[in-house]
Amino acid sequence: MRRRETHSEGLRVYAHVEAYPRFDIQEASRALRAGTPDVVWQDRQVKNIGLAVPIWENRNRLFLSYIFEDTPNMDACRGSQRFDVVYDGPFERFHKPYLICPSCKDKVQFVCFKDEVWLCRTCHGLKNRTALIGTKARRSEQAAELERVLVDPDTRTLARPSGMHQATYQRKRARLSKLNKQLSHERVDASTDYAFVITAQWRKASASELESAGADWDKRHAPATAASRPLVTPSLLTEDDQDPD
Ligand SMILES: [Zn+2]
């Protein structure tokens, strides 16, 4: 089922989770209920690098069709994988879903796509980027992110953004001040080893995105319109819908 599209030389083996496409079942569950049933992965330049369409087969089984373009850490590929889904309580409508890692059978919130298979980060040997970049680089990034939110672009000074509660603003300001103190007002960039980061965006993929994902992509799993997509959520299914196996 999985099919290699192209071959590229010198793929990098990144050690951080964020360098790989992640499929988060709790995000998926929320998105499917909200009617935004596709996930698009992008790199830091906001370039689309992949797309997936998840479909509930029943409340304990999810089918994921995906397609990826060439990236620094992966050959272009497409395929599909089934996941067992469990809930942390008897009433699945009110409890969080978890994926069963196909390899170690652990209950996990997300799986990562690496070496053409979706597994939990432990099985793939991946660590959080923040744990790897070092304390100074981590604090520098946190400070930069706080400044992005708190610094008024016109006046270049700290100002409470409209819509932010005063208490939140004061807390973020205090956090930024503490970080600056810890950093002695110096900033350190993370190693370029950790520059490649992929983020997921849940939305309805456009017709052209689905088309660019490949005209020969199995129509059953990538219907051209949302209307033809078998969109069901686990809470709408009954025991009778469960697989016989
Ligand atoms: Zn695992």
Image: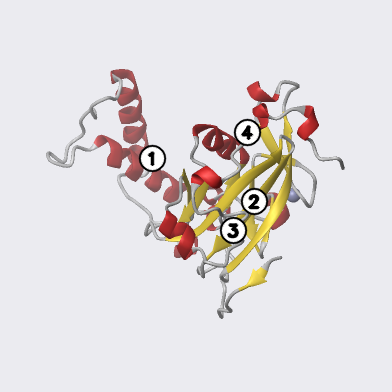
SS assignment at label 1: helix
**Could you say where residue 178 lies in the image, as x and y percent from the top left?**
36, 33
- Residue at 66% x, 64% y: name it: 116
Q: What colour scheme was applied to this rendering of the protein?
A: secondary structure
Q: Which residue is mark 1?
A: 182
Position of the N terminus by quadrant: bottom right
Q: Amino acid at mark 3?
A: Lys
Gap in Å between the C-alphas at discs 3 and 1?
55 Å
**Could you say where residue 151 lies in the image, as x and y percent from the top left?**
22, 38
Gap in Å between the C-alphas at discs 2 and 4?
14 Å
Gap in Å between the C-alphas at discs 3 and 4?
21 Å
- Answer left or right for 91 relative to 186: right
Gap in Å between the C-alphas at discs 3 and 2?
14 Å
**Could you say where residue 86 lies in the image, as x and y percent from the top left?**
74, 34
Which-is-in-front pick, marks 3 and 1?
3
- Residue at 33% x, 45% y: name it: 144
Q: Quarter-wise, where is residue 84 in the image? A: top right
**Could you say where residue 98 lies in the image, as x and y percent from the top left?**
69, 36
* Residue 44 seen by the camera: yes
Q: Amino acid at mark 2?
A: Leu
Q: Which residue is mark 3?
A: 219
Q: Earlier in the sequence, mark 3 or mark 1?
A: 1
Residues packed near mark 3 inside 10 Å, few (<14), some (14 to 19) or many (20 plus)? few
The answer as to whether callout 2 falls within 8 Å of ligand 1 is no
